[in-house]
């Protein structure tokens, strides 16, 4: 649920675009480097992009009585780091803005900042901080918080543009937060679980790539054989 | 069922429950239950800031709710197709690589045969 077309004043729209653009450009270069350095990673890159594509198309009812959709950025963040996700997320936002009238071109910068930049970086920080505990736990927390923080940032962006006439910025943050962030909590949990599901699937079926990307670690497994030991190691951790 | 497959199944069940519980409990409110959070934000802005005029509108707007939901379904279908293809290729590649070096029986199919359940 992104900020709709035209619903940010021109100054705000321009400012967020300026803020988001360097991240996306840097991400595009990181993406090209990644593909050149490791052509075999293209399939997982496709999987990460496709995962965002699916999840951000699914509008799911929430306990608040409204609906919203997950972001799907956690998987790409964990596999390829946030710069790459900045590009993949922006592509999804552009598709939705152009074909679905969901989000918009004028609000693309703000939406890219929340979904493709802030969310992934926060998720990545959580992932790095909790990776010691185990792959499953850290992936769950990373994906859940990347999702939730996206909508907290959206609430903040709208509050900055539309402070409450009576209670000011604080009131507006609370108001938009109750619309976006509270609705998002169960969805963020669902997204965390789905991301863990995909990572488990990849750990079983593509342990070599995950090792190369640094998602699985050699210390995760008791045995030395990479290809056969991945499953028990991953299970023991989750 | 292996422990791994059971965990996967529980994850799927939990996700389905998260989506279904609000519907089953009938938590939708107002004229349009379970309306989008973005539409709520829009109406909240226009009611608190009546002077604000959205200054740009979408270049292309799906002409009806049906067309819009169709396009969303298309997005999900494309994503799911590509995701399935990528995971399938990665899986096949992994299995073919393993096929060249013989491995113990119960490691061959982690999610499948009953032999794997003997794993502690």
Image (cartoon, rainbow, N blue to C red):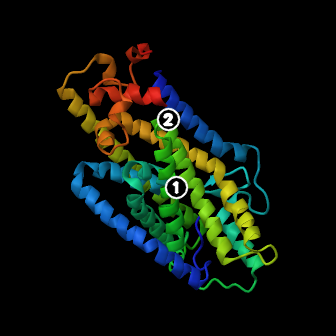
Along the viewing direction, whichever of A92 and A181 lies nearer the viewer: A181
Q: Is residue B59 left or right of residue B28?
A: left
Say if B90 sits above or below A95 in the image: above
A220 above or below A70?
A: above
**Distance of label 2 from label 1 (alpha carbons):** 18 Å
Q: Position of residue A139 (x, y in %)?
A: 48, 43
Can you say whether B75 is above or below A132 in the image? below
Identify which residue is drawn at 34% across, 48% down: A44
* Chain ID of residue with mark 1: A
In this view of the protein, which residue sits in the foreground, A39 or B13? A39
Dot 2: element:
loop
Expressed as whole percent of the image width and height from the top left, the position of residue B30 reads: 79, 61
Q: Is residue B58 visible?
A: no
Locate the N terminus of chain A and report the quarter of the image it occupies.
bottom right
- Chain assignment, label 2: A
Residue A122: image tag: 1
Residue drawn at the location 36% of the way across and 33% of the way down: A204
Badge 2: residue crowd in 10 Å (few <14, some 14–19, many ≥20) = few
Q: In what element is the residue under mark 1?
A: helix
Q: Whole-percent x and y of residue A79?
A: 38, 48
Q: Residue furthest right?
A: A166
Can the viewer see residue B120? yes
Q: Position of residue A159 (x, y in %)?
A: 68, 72
Which residue shows up at 40% across the image and 25% down it?
A: A232
Residue holding disc 2: A133
């Amino acid at each position: 649920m992104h900020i709709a077309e035209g619903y940010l004043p021109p100054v705000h729209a321009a400012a967020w675009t300026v803020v988001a653009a360097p991240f996306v450009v840097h991400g595009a270069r990181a993406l090209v480097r990644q593909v050149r350095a490791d052509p075999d990673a293209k399939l997982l890159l496709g999987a990460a992009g496709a995962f965002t594509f699916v999840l951000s198309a699914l509008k799911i009812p929430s306990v608040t009585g409204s609906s919203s959709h997950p972001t799907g950025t956690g998987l790409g963040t964990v596999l390829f780091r946030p710069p790459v996700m900045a590009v993949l997320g922006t592509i999804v936002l552009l598709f939705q803005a152009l074909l679905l009238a969901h989000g918009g071109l004028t609000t693309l910068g703000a939406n890219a900042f929340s979904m493709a930049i802030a969310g992934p970086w926060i998720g990545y920080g959580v992932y790095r901080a909790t990776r010691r505990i185990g792959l499953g736990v850290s992936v769950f927390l990373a994906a859940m918080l990347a999702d939730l923080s996206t909508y907290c940032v959206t609430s903040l962006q709208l509050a900055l543009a539309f402070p409450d006439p009576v209670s000011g910025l604080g009131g507006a943050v609370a108001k938009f937060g109750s619309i976006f962030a509270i609705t998002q909590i169960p969805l963020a949990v669902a997204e965390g679980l789905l991301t863990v599901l995909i990572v488990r699937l990849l750990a079983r079926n593509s342990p070599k790539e995950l090792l190369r990307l640094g998602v699985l670690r050699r210390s995760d497994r008791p045995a030395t054989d990479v290809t056969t030991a991945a499953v028990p190691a991953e299970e023991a951790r989750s | 069922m292996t422990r791994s497959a059971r965990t996967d199944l529980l994850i799927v069940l939990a996700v389905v429950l998260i989506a279904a519980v609000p519907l089953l409990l009938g938590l939708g409110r107002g004229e349009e239950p379970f309306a989008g959070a973005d539409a709520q934000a829009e109406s909240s802005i226009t009611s608190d800031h009546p002077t604000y005029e959205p200054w740009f509108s979408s270049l292309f707007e799906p002409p009806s709710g049906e067309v819009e939901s169709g396009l969303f379904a298309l997005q999900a279908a494309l994503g799911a197709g590509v995701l399935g293809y990528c995971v399938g290729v990665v899986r096949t590649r992994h299995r073919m690589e393993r096929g060249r070096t013989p491995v113990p029986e119960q490691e061959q199919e982690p999610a499948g045969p009953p032999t794997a359940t003997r794993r502690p």
